[in-house]
């Protein structure tokens, strides 16, 4: 997935841009038609989810795709809350679409949802993706804990990220969690789990009181599961999921650091500003150094309990053994990278010279030389 973070918080009267990334089998690809976006409140979302899950699970009926005037809000008599849209999404790059929404200044603060409806092919079922956005009063001040990151990634960057995940740090990007009990948040409808960055394939499994349930919940793949109906006090929920130790933004940062290190190798006049335009013979060095940075993060993270428990609960045996293995692998990678960096910039282009004489002397060269110098 590209490094795109959609807005999860907005102010009354603010203009926001909402993103959505479409993936099939881990590959970014565009839907068959232009996706549509609706912004709904919590009551409308629960009613719509319960009706659609009762009929077809993840698919959606055609009536839910019917259009109304763009930017208009349905009255409360037509639905249980305000509904904005549907808006037609705009394409930013392959697999990444966005929709612009002007939050009404009179809109009540609270949780709202941007519902994306689309088809993978013209004859297939209508699919739905749901994301949450929290609207704050206009007088509020939002202190962003981290800035939003948005960057376009081309084929070269995506292939390098996949190469890094699938060959260098595969195990760290495919960590299984079995039978983790979810903690219910204050809103009474959201379950919180320990780790973010869930993999979409395989699909997470949710169990309610030891019984597997396939409908009635939505996972945002960042450690939160939204229940469509409030649970009973005695209900217990468990999840089985696979998560990534590093997010896509962190992988992109590792690759950029590898590019910066390659630029720092003499001669410094030979450099590239983006991983998208670097030469092919630099790829191995950049990906390898990105793996080195990831191993550094792993070793450092295992000094903290929340990270260490991923690889074992016993510090003296399991965790310390993981640290030693990571350090050994780090040394091997660093030795290989130093060997590559010695000659990476010594590859010179072929040089050829064409000489065209300005004057041609008649006769043999040796006879005219004797005339000139004797």
Image (tube, grey):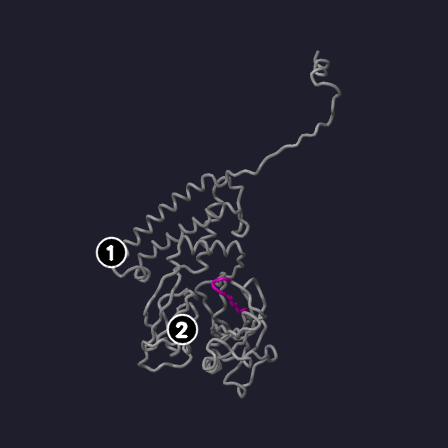
Left of 185 or right of it: where is 318?
left
**Could you tell which of marks 1 and 2 lies nearer the N-terminus?**
2
Looking at the rendered structure, which numbered label has been put on residue 317?
1
Tell me, yes or no, whether the two marked residues, 1 and 2, touch with CB atoms within 8 Å: no
Quadrant position of the C terminus in the picture: top right
309 magenta-colored = no
18 magenta-colored = yes
**Point 53% across, 82% down: residue:** 82
Give the residue at the far left of this rendering. Answer: 316
Give the residue at the far top of this rendering. Answer: 374
**Point 40% across, 71% down: residue:** 224
**Point 53% across, 64% down: residue:** 29
Find numbered disc 2 in the image and state the secondary structure of the residue it sits on: strand
Q: Which residue occupies the foreground of this view, 205 or 295?
A: 205
Badge 2 crowding class, 10 Å Cα cut-off, few under 14, some 14 to 19, many 20 or more, is many
Quarter of the image for residue 219 reads: bottom left
Badge 1 crowding class, 10 Å Cα cut-off, few under 14, some 14 to 19, many 20 or more, is few
Query: Eyeballing the image, is 108 above or below 165?
Result: below
Task: State how far apart marks 1 and 2 are (Cα).
Answer: 34 Å
Quarter of the image for residue 316 reads: bottom left
The residues colored magenta run: 17-27
Q: Which residue does the numbered mark 2 point to in the structure image?
A: 225
């Amino acid at each position: 997935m590209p490094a795109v973070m959609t807005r999860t918080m907005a102010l009354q009267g603010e203009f926001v841009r909402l993103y959505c990334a479409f993936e099939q089998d881990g590959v970014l690809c565009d839907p068959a038609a232009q996706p549509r976006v609706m912004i709904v409140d919590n009551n409308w979302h629960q009613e719509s989810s319960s009706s659609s899950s009762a009929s077809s699970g993840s698919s959606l009926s055609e009536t839910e795709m019917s259009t109304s005037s763009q930017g208009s809000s349905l009255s409360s008599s037509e639905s249980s809350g305000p509904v904005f849209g549907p808006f037609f999404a705009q394409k930013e790059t392959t697999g990444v679409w966005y929709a612009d929404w002007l939050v009404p200044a009179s809109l009540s603060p609270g949780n709202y949802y941007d519902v994306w409806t689309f088809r993978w092919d013209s004859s297939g079922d209508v699919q739905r993706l749901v994301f949450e956005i929290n609207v704050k009063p206009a007088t509020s001040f939002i202190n962003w804990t981290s800035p939003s990151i948005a960057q376009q990634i081309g084929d070269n960057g995506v292939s390098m990220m996949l190469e890094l995940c699938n060959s260098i740090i595969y195990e760290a990007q495919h960590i299984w969690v079995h039978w983790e009990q979810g903690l219910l948040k204050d809103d009474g409808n959201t379950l919180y789990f320990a780790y973010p960055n869930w993999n979409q394939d395989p699909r997470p499994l949710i169990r309610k009181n030891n019984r597997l349930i396939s409908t009635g919940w939505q996972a945002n793949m960042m450690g939160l599961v939204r229940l469509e109906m409030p649970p009973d006090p005695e209900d217990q929920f468990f999840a089985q999921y696979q998560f990534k130790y590093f997010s896509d933004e962190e992988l992109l940062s590792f690759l950029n650091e590898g590019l910066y290190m390659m630029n720092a190798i003499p001669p410094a006049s030979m450099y590239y500003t983006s991983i998208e335009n670097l030469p092919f013979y630099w790829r191995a060095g950049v990906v390898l150094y990105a793996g080195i940075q990831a191993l550094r993060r792993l070793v450092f993270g295992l000094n903290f309990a929340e990270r260490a428990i991923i690889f074992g609960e016993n510090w003296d045996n399991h965790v310390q053994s993981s640290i030693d293995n990571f350090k050994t692998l780090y040394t091997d990678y660093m030795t290989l990278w130093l060997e590559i960096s010695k000659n990476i910039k010594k590859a010179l282009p072929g040089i050829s010279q064409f000489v065209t004489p300005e004057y041609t002397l008649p006769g043999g060269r040796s006879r005219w030389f004797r005339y000139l110098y004797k």
